[in-house]
Image (cartoon, grey):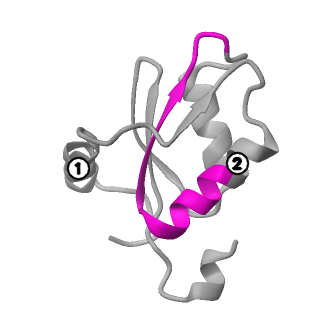
């Protein structure tokens, strides 16, 4: 997959892969804190596909939270948002130094 926007076929394949994933992060009343963003960045070092839950106590909707994550993490893209569950994709970098971003 390229660094550009996902095609519908790529998105469908990623949705299927994400089906059995457990959420790696929960976003609660504190919202999208620096600690949550750091945790997501670290998770993207080892995997391309992440699922997270946006709890009812969160100050923003799942869509708004997903948009904020995409704005903060280079290369991250929203694959799917269902209810309060968000699936994000970012390709693993070829260069280990690039992964540190």
Q: Is residue 54 magenta?
A: yes
> In the image, is 59 to the left or to the right of 41?
right
The residue at which mark 1 appears reads as: 17
Q: Nearer the viewer, residue 1 or 96?
A: 96
Q: Which residues are magenta?
A: 39-57
Residue sitting at x 28%, y 49%: 11
From the viewer's perspective, is residue 82 above or below residue 45?
above
The residue at which mark 2 appears reads as: 37
> In the image, is 31 to the left or to the right of 25?
right
Label at residue 75 = none
Q: Badge 2: few (under 14), some or many (20 or more) residues near its Cα, within 10 Å?
A: some
Q: Nearer the viewer, residue 76 or 46?
A: 46
From the viewer's perspective, is residue 31 above or below residue 42?
above
Q: Position of residue 35 (x, y in %)?
A: 76, 45
Q: Quadrant of residue 76?
A: bottom right
Residue sitting at x 47%, y 68%: 46
Total numbered badges shown on the rendered structure: 2
Q: Position of residue 62 (x, y in %)?
A: 55, 24
SS class, disc 2: helix
Q: Badge 1: few (under 14), some or many (20 or more) residues near its Cα, within 10 Å?
A: few
Q: Alpha-carbon distance for marks 2 and 1?
A: 23 Å
- Work out whether mark 2 precedes mark 1 in sequence or the reverse, and give the earlier one: 1
Q: Quadrant of residue 2?
A: bottom left
Q: Are marks 2 and 1 in contact (CB under 8 Å)?
A: no
């Amino acid at each position: 997959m390229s660094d550009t926007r996902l095609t519908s076929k790529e998105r469908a394949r990623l949705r299927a892969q994400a089906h059995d994933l457990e959420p790696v992060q929960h976003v609660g009343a504190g919202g999208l804190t620096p600690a949550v963003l750091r945790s997501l960045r670290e998770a993207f070092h080892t995997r391309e596909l992440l699922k997270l839950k946006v709890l009812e106590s969160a100050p923003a909707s799942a869509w708004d939270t997903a948009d904020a994550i995409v704005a903060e993490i280079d290369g991250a893209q929203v694959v799917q948002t269902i209810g309060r569950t968000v699936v994000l994709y970012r390709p693993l970098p070829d260069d280990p130094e690039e992964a540190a971003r």
